[in-house]
Amino acid sequence: MTRRTFVTALLAVLLVAAPLIAAVKFTSTWAAPGARNVTFKGQKVAALVISDDMSLRQSAEEALSRELTARGITGAAAYRIIPNSELKDVERAKAWFTKGSVAGVVALRPVSYDKVKRYTETLWTSPYYSSLWGYYPYGWGTTYTYSSTVDTVIVVEVLIYQVSTGDLVWAGVSEATNPKTLQKLVADIVKEAAKKIEKQFR
């Protein structure tokens, strides 16, 4: 699946997501040895959203840069630093970040979305489970589980790089279940990412 196709599919999923909302959470994080010695306080940090959807990029990068600025870091949306035509060229992007005196880059990238079946109490009262003799042929004859609830789980990775060395200094994977809208999903991820950055690099 291409990145453009992924974003299009992601939008479609979000429009029909179930009303049950769960907050964004980081399921895994990592910090490089010596990351505590890195500080972005008072320095310019670019917010980069890796997506071919320009409107999504702009809104998310602006939101993240505002959150960074509110925490004592000078946030800057990457689309304001690098022309879109040169964004995917690594050498040109590097030159633009260097020219713009960017100390760090926070990159957000949608990784995956999945439909996940959850067990609910209706499972145990279904005809398949209500008696041993109803369950017996069902259990042996199928490889999937009936469930009345299907959650949409979306995963986004957050990476923080130091521009001067090019080194990855922090990484995290955030997971959201059944986000109601794309805007809310992005806003929640941005806020959680900014909190993690403030805690790690204040």
Image: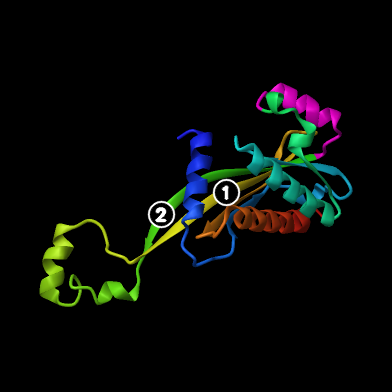
Please state which of the two labelled residues, at mark 1 or mark 2, is closer to the viewer.
2
**Which mark is drawn over residue 115?**
2
**Which mark is drawn over residue 156?**
1
On the picture, is 94 further left or further right than 19?
Answer: right
Q: Between residues 23 and 25, which one lies in front from this camera angle?
A: 23
Q: How packed is label 1: few (under 14 Cα within 10 Å), some, or many (20 or more)?
A: many
On the picture, is 173 further left or further right than 34?
Answer: left
Residue shown at 40% from the left, 54% from the top: 115
Amino acid type shown at disc 2: Lys
User: Is residue 96 on the magenta stretch?
Assistant: yes
Q: Is residue 169 above or below residue 179?
A: above
Secondary-structure class at tag 1 = strand
Residue 77 screen position, x and y as percent: 76, 41
Count of numbered marks:
2
Q: CA distance from mark 1 to mark 2?
A: 15 Å
Question: Which segment is the magenta one?
Answer: 88-103
Residue 67 screen position, x and y as percent: 77, 54
Do we see residue 165 in this rendering?
A: yes
